Amino acid sequence: MLTNIGAFLFILLAFARVNVILSRGSTTILELLLIAQSGLAAILLIFRRKPFYTAPRRVEVMIWLSAGLPLLMNTPATNTNFWMSLAPVPGLVLNLWAMACLGSAFGVAPAERGLVLTGPYRLVRHPMYSGELLSLFGVLLCNPSSRNGAVMLVFLITLIWRIYWEEKILLITGYGIYAKILMWRLLPWIW
């Protein structure tokens, strides 16, 4: 149920972003990547595999709310310095790469849909989250404010909680071996 609503919301978000571009008559690479992210999330949610194990419903709801936190950030204005406006781009590219590698194993709430060991999943265990954090840090650099800082902090805390639940569910399968081989969750040589 949450997944169907989530897919619908990602489709609406993609269309809203396209509408902004059409009404303004110009676009940025950041906006195009955000449209790609929303569209890919919707497609992957629609065509994802049925999970073997899932988090409790209360956890799913909280994680869906957490996933929406970045929408509360004030993004860089279109008149921002061009180079500075590119700060979120590497994170979005990493996020899209990780989503594409997940394919039908993609989901927002923690669930076990099979282990993915290709692409950026050879470098860190949660590269999609690494990409999200990197892109949000880029937004914070472009548009430093107490609001953006607070959203970033809350998102980071909920992301760590999300990783805890995801790894707890994945330990039911062969994830423990993968976690011993690849020690880094988000940042190589750090955590």
Image: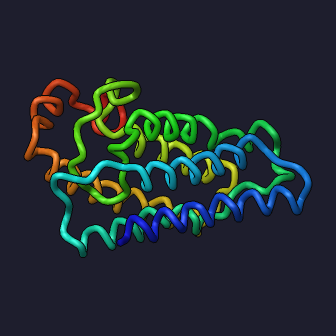
Q: Which sits in the foreground, 189 or 117?
A: 117
- Quick one: quadrant of the N terminus? bottom left
Q: Is residue 62 left or right of residue 182?
A: right
User: Residue 66 appears at what percent x and percent y?
Assistant: 41, 66
Q: Residue drawn at (83%, 53%), measured in percent from left and top?
A: 78
Coloring scheme used: rainbow
- In the displayed structure, 99 sits above or below 13; it is above
- Residue at the right extreme of this rendering: 25
- In the displayed structure, 138 sits above or below 117; it is below
- The quarter of the displayed image where residue 104 is located: top left
Q: Residue drawn at (16%, 55%), measured in percent from left and top?
A: 53
- Quick one: quadrant of the C terminus? top left
Q: Which sits in the foreground, 96 or 125?
A: 96
User: Residue 180 appears at what percent x and percent y?
Assistant: 13, 29
How many tags in the picture? 0
User: Residue 167 appears at what percent x and percent y?
Assistant: 19, 48
Q: Residue drawn at (27%, 59%), measured in percent from left and top?
A: 161
Q: Is residue 128 left or right of residue 147?
A: left
Q: Residue drawn at (34%, 30%), measured in percent from left and top?
A: 121
Q: Which sits in the foreground, 104 or 177?
A: 104
- In the displayed structure, 10 sits above or below 93; it is below
